[in-house]
Amino acid sequence: MVYIGIDLGGTNIKAGIVDEQGKILCKVDCPSKVERGHEAVIADMAALARKAVEKAGLTMDDVKCIGIGVPGILDPKTGVVPFCVNLGWHNVPLRELMRSHIDKPVFIDNDATVAGLAESVAGISKGSQSSVFLTLGTGVGGGIVINGKVYSGAHGVGSELGHTIVEFDGELCNCGNHGCWERYASATALIRMGKEAAESHPECMIYRHVNGNLDRISAKTVIDCAKAGDPVASTVFKRYAYYLAVGIVSIINSLDPEIIALGGGVSAAGDFLLNAVRNEVNEMIFYKGMPYARIELATMGNDAGIVGAAMLGR
Ligand code: BGC
């Protein structure tokens, strides 16, 4: 038997067929286009799941169950998503609607939580007793694993690290508050900061890179220009790394995990990101000379969300 793992993101939906050992047999993806509303997105997820099964040369009879990683708050018992800022969903009965398309058991959990679990089972956090996985994508998600078990708090929202407030009266977040960490440490934030900088510095490399069409600025644009030594992009990236470190230091001060693993779009910056963040964290840690969490890049890449989701029902 195989499992279907679906990584439902604010930008893309990825689905994969995963075997008993957690190996991906094949994967497919499509844009989420969340503005169409939840019913269209769920119909696309079901179509994508069928496509993955077909691509793997299997039939639905070979599938044991479906797991979905959701970028928001959800109730794994009822299968309802009460609040998902990245998709604009309120009280969506995800499990029930998914089952109306494909009649298989459906398990749901938070996207970063499942990816964090996958990293702790087969990725960079393997063998650790305590780890925190951070996904730096559309938002910032947190996956806390303690003694091999996911920790989601008493009410299921214990790993909503992206909504920790780091700036009073700061940027408005999709959640309705101001100054949430994800407004400063997500890929979306890096893009926003890159756009603002390019607007006021048309002489910079970011601006030239997109021929003045600022809507084309991606996180990669800013990273590439910073890597190339452009002063404006370097300032933006340093500011980004500073904000990322602010949240990481708070995680270290509250949980003191063995390892903090960085995943999601911005982590593609690799050692460039790692060096910048490690330096900032080192500056901010107040107990100098004592050991603290290793900060590393997640190793399962884009696959962590699919594998972790698929493993939900195993
Ligand atoms: C959501 C989290 C999610 C994260 C990454 C945040 O905005 O509140 O639940 O894990 O984005 O997708």
Image: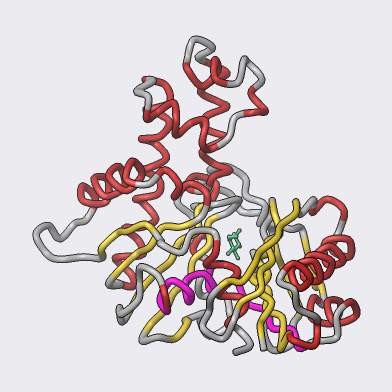
Q: Residue furthest left?
A: 289
**Image quadrant where residue 309 sits:** bottom right
Q: Position of residue 137 (x, y in %)?
A: 56, 51
Q: Is residue 73 visible?
A: no
Q: Is residue 256 left or right of residue 63?
A: left
At 37% across and 43% down in the image, what residue appears? 241
Residue 289 x, y percent position in the rendering? 9, 59
Ligand 1 - quadrant of the structure image: bottom right
Q: Return the residue nearer the eye: 248 or 212.
A: 212
| Residue 255 place in picture, x, y as percent | 33, 73
Which image quarter is the N terminus in? Answer: bottom right
Q: Is residue 112 magenta?
A: yes
Determine which quarter of the picture holds residue 76: bottom right
The residue closer to the viewer here, 83 or 101, is 101
* Above or below, comparing residue 269 to residue 64 in the picture: above
Count the marks: 0
Q: Position of residue 140 (x, y in %)?
A: 53, 56
Q: Nearer the viewer, residue 201 or 181?
A: 201
Q: Which residues are magenta?
A: 105-121
Scheme of colours in the image: secondary structure
Q: Quadrant of residue 280?
A: top left
State whether residue 90 is above or below residue 209.
Answer: below
Residue furthest to the front in view is 57
Left or right: residue 248 compared with residue 275: right
Q: Is residue 180 magenta?
A: no
**Which residue sits at x=44%, y=26%?**
225
Whether residue 115 appears in this view of the structure is: yes
Question: In the displayed structure, would residue 204 be above or below residue 153?
Answer: above
